[in-house]
Image (cartoon, rainbow, N blue to C red):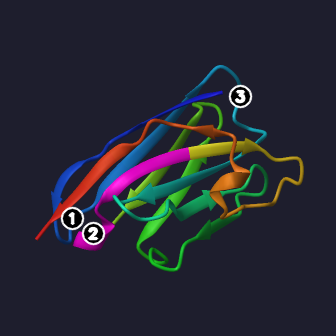
């Protein structure tokens, strides 16, 4: 599967932004989908993930209550809704996927994911 992230941009503190991850090549209905983010000099950080079945979601501690992940398998799209953005949310955001045979898993370790999009930059200006 090929993943394409989009929706990044320059926003102000407190704004909302929606990131999109579009997939091509095959269905994503069997995949756990996730968003990670990375700033220069730091490790790529897990942001949010959604299981392939049951709609189970999981969030990194720094974005709980602030970001929401959702998926539309028919449209092969995963959306990350970001609200109340802060300067520390500035990063390149990557979408990722892996085929999930367990169905309810949401790994937070980036090494567990096989497919990555190219990243989209989010800059939150104060």
Location of residue 101 in the rendering, given as x and y in whole percent from the top left corner: 89, 47
Element type where label 3 sits in the image: loop
Location of residue 22 in the rendering, given as x and y in whole percent from the top left corner: 51, 32
Q: Nearer the viewer, residue 73 or 50?
A: 50
Looking at the picture, does residue 11 appear above or below residue 89? above
* Mark identifier at residue 85: 2
Residue occupying the point 54% across, 73% down = 60
Residue occupying the point 73% across, 43% down = 98
Of the image marks 1 and 2, the number of the one nearer the N terminus? 1
Please name the residue that numbered disc 3 is placed on.
27
Are the residues at dot 3 and dot 2 in contact (C-beta closer than 8 Å)? Answer: no
Q: Which residues are magenta?
A: 85-95
Residue at far front of view:
41
Residue occupying the point 84% across, 53% down = 103
Residue occupying the point 30% across, 47% down = 121
Quarter of the figure with the C terminus: bottom left
Q: Nearer the viewer, residue 93 or 40?
A: 40
Element type where label 2 sits in the image: loop
The answer to whether residue 86 shows anywhere in this view is no
Please name the residue that numbered disc 1 is placed on.
15
45 part of magenta stretch: no
């Amino acid at each position: 599967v090929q993943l394409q992230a989009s929706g990044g941009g320059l926003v102000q503190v407190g704004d909302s932004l929606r990131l999109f991850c579009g997939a091509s090549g095959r269905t994503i209905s069997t995949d756990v989908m996730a968003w990670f983010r990375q700033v220069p000099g730091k490790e790529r950080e897990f942001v949010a993930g959604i299981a392939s079945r049951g709609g189970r979601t999981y969030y990194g501690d720094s974005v709980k209550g602030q970001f929401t992940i959702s998926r539309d398998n028919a449209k092969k799209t995963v959306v990350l809704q970001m609200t109340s953005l802060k300067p520390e949310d500035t990063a390149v955001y990557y979408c990722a996927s892996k085929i999930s045979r367990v169905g309810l898993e949401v790994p937070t370790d980036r090494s567990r994911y096989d497919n990555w999009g190219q990243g989209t930059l989010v800059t939150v200006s104060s």
